[in-house]
Each structure stands twice: as C-alpha cells, then as structure tokens.
Image (spheres, rainbow, N blue to C red):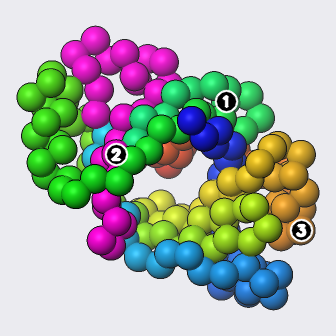
Amino acid sequence: MQRQIEVKILEIDVDEIIGKLTDMGAEIEFDGILISIYFDDKSKRFSKGGDTLRLRQAHEIKTMAFKENVSKEHAKVKDLLEVKIAEVDVMQNILQALGFTVLDRSEKRRTEFYNNNFYYNIDSYADIPSYLELEGPDLPSIRSAARELGFSPDQLKPWSIKDLFAHYKKL
C-alpha cells in the first residue's frame, strides 16, 4: 500500500507554473485527458468515510484504484491500492454486477511534471480555473516545494475533488 499526500493550489497561472517547473528541471510525465469513473455501494460506505473507488483512463493506461482516507487536516492523505487493468468498460460492468453504482464520471486535462520525489499536476476541468495538485513524501517537504513556486502555506488546500467542485458550486 502506498501513502499519498497531496494539496491543491487554486487558480494558478498555468504558463508561469510551467515555466518555473521547467526551470527547476521537472520533466513532463503525462500530458492529456484523464477520464475517471467513481463508485460506491448502496450504503455510500466509501463516500461517508472519505474513501474512493475509481477507474481511470489516461491515454492507453487504465487503472482501478482504492484510496482509503487517512487525514484531511493539513493535506489530503490517503492509502492507495492501484492496479492496471485491460478494459475500463469490462471492469465497470464487474463492479456494477457486484453491487457498486457509478457516483460520477469526470474528464479533466492534466499536465503532470515529476521532479525530486514530487508530482506537480496541473489540472483543468471545464468551468473551473486551473489548479496545481502537489504530491510529495510529507507535509513539510510539500510546503517547501510550494514555497519554491511562490505559494504560501495558506494557499495549500487539503481538498478532494468533491471539495473543489463544492467551492466552485459545480456539485
């Protein structure tokens, strides 16, 4: 199981951030559309606990992930189990046959940079300003990496996608 620690920084200047990341030596790992399908059972067990069951497609890479909520105090911290799958549609049918229902389907544009144990994801949804998702090994180093990009600790949000959509009243 992998521990995932991340924050979101809202309403970024995409060109400025790309310039800073490039100057730091960060390299693009992915640039394209991410399609995600979220599931829960009838009791809403995952939603109530802040957990996530998701299928995702990024170009030809297809995955199924379960993220168990650990904390949302200063950063979004989740334990992640993820596996590559062959076909999203087949896995969706399997999950639905097991009693899971689709909660949401989303599409976003992501440009993902990697540098020194950090993922810098520039994400864009329709009708929501672009934001930076910063993922690293621990909160102090995430704060330091954010500071290198010119952001203060009060700009770091421990938000889920649901929180982001609620902030912009898109739920």
Q: Which mark is residue 72?
A: 1
* Tag 1 and tag 2, C-beta contact below 8 Å: no
Task: Determine the image quadrant of residue 59.
Answer: bottom left
Indicate which disc, 2 or 3, sits on the residue closer to the N terminus: 2
45 magenta-colored: yes
What is the CA distance from the residue labelled 2 to the residue labelled 3? 33 Å
Image quarter where the C terminus lies is top left
Residue 48 vs 107, above or below: the answer is: above
The residue under label 2 is 64
Q: Nearer the viewer, mark 1 or mark 2?
A: 2
Determine whether, in the image, residue 126 is placed left or right of residue 22.
left
Residue type marked 1: Lys
Write the residue at 31% across / 59% down: 62
- Which stretch appears magenta? 39-64
Write the residue at 77% across / 48% down: 137
Counting the numbered discs, the total is 3
Image quarter where the N terminus lies is top right
Judge whether residue 151 can be spotted in this image. Answer: no
Q: Which mark is residue 126?
A: none
Determine whether, in the image, residue 152 is placed left or right of residue 103.
right
What is the CA distance from the residue labelled 3 to the residue labelled 1? 23 Å
Write the residue at 84% across / 61% down: 145
Query: Percent x, y for residue 102?
Result: 21, 36
Determine whether, in the image, residue 83 is placed left or right of residue 167.
left
Residue type marked 3: Glu
Write the residue at 82% across / 81% down: 24
